[in-house]
């Protein structure tokens, strides 16, 4: 008797965003590509608009948090997401600069990864309202594996003053 072994499913929390071109179309295209190439999106937050963080003299961003089920490892997933960014016109000319799309892995299961090409949990996520607010919407009780605090607790403690507005007209 032979048994088929199903690949284990990994859970990845992603944040997608962008501030160039048709921002909503870019988010939707990123979601289509992620579903087609990386796994199955299980949850989507609302779409939020936020002033640019870090380099503030640029157009505002649309951001959205996603929960992805995937059979890929974190490094394999990151490679796929980088390919999707390139396909959607992402240029890495200026750190924190404008972009058509940015796709970040915020969490990957409960793993802590610190390599030269990938850091998970995302190293700045707990300092940024534009990450925490959509994450709280889809995973309020998920615990940051290093800080041992829920997303809700991290948001309550966050000192970021950047305003994040839920977009209801999409």
Image (cartoon, rainbow, N blue to C red):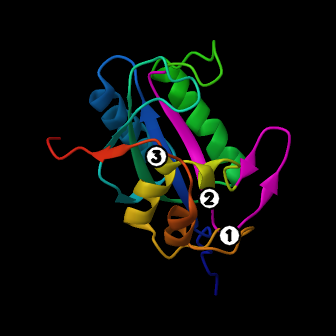
Pointer 3 with pointer 2, Cβ within 8 A = no
For the record, the magenta segment spans 99-120
Asked if disc 2 and disc 1 are in contact, CB closer than 8 Å, the reply is yes
User: Is 126 in front, or is 40?
Assistant: 126
Q: Is residue 96 above or below residue 63?
A: above
For the residue labelled by badge 2, is the local secondary structure a helix, a strand or a loop? strand
Q: Which is more toward the observer, 122 or 9?
A: 122
At a point 35% along the width and 28% down the height, the residue shown is 26
- Farthest left residue? 169
- Farthest residue to the bottom: give it: 1
The residue nearer to you, when weighing 104 against 169, is 169
N-term-proximal mark, 1 vs 3: 1
How many numbered callouts? 3
Distance (Cα) linking label 2 and label 1: 7 Å
Residue 127, how many percent across, how many down? Answer: 61, 50
Please check the rendered image and state whether residue 102 is part of the magenta-colored stretch, yes or no. yes
**Residue 110, which numbered label?**
1
The vertical placement of 81 against 101, above or below, is below
Q: What label sits on residue 107 in the rendered view? A: 2
Numbered label attached to residue 130 = 3
Percent from the top left, x then y, of residue 6? 58, 72
Crowdedness near tag 3: few (<14), some (14–19) or many (≥20) residues, C-alpha within 10 Å: many
């Amino acid at each position: 008797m032979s048994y088929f072994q199903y690949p284990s499913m990994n859970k990845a929390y992603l944040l997608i965003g962008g501030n160039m071109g048709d921002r909503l179309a870019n988010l939707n295209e990123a979601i289509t590509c992620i579903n087609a190439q990386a796994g199955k999106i299980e949850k989507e937050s609302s779409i939020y608009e936020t002033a640019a963080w870090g380099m503030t003299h640029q157009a505002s961003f649309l951001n959205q948090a996603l929960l992805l089920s995937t059979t890929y490892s974190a490094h394999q997933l990151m490679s796929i997401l980088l390919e999707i960014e390139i396909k959607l016109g992402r240029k890495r000319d200026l750190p924190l600069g404008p972009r058509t799309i940015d796709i970040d892995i915020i969490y990957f299961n409960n793993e802590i990864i610190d390599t030269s090409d990938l850091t998970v949990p995302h190293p700045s996520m707990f300092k940024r309202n534009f990450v925490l607010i959509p994450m709280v919407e889809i995973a309020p009780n998920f615990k940051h594996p290093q800080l041992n605090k829920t997303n809700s607790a991290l948001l309550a403690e966050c000192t970021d003053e950047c305003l994040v507005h839920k977009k209801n007209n999409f």
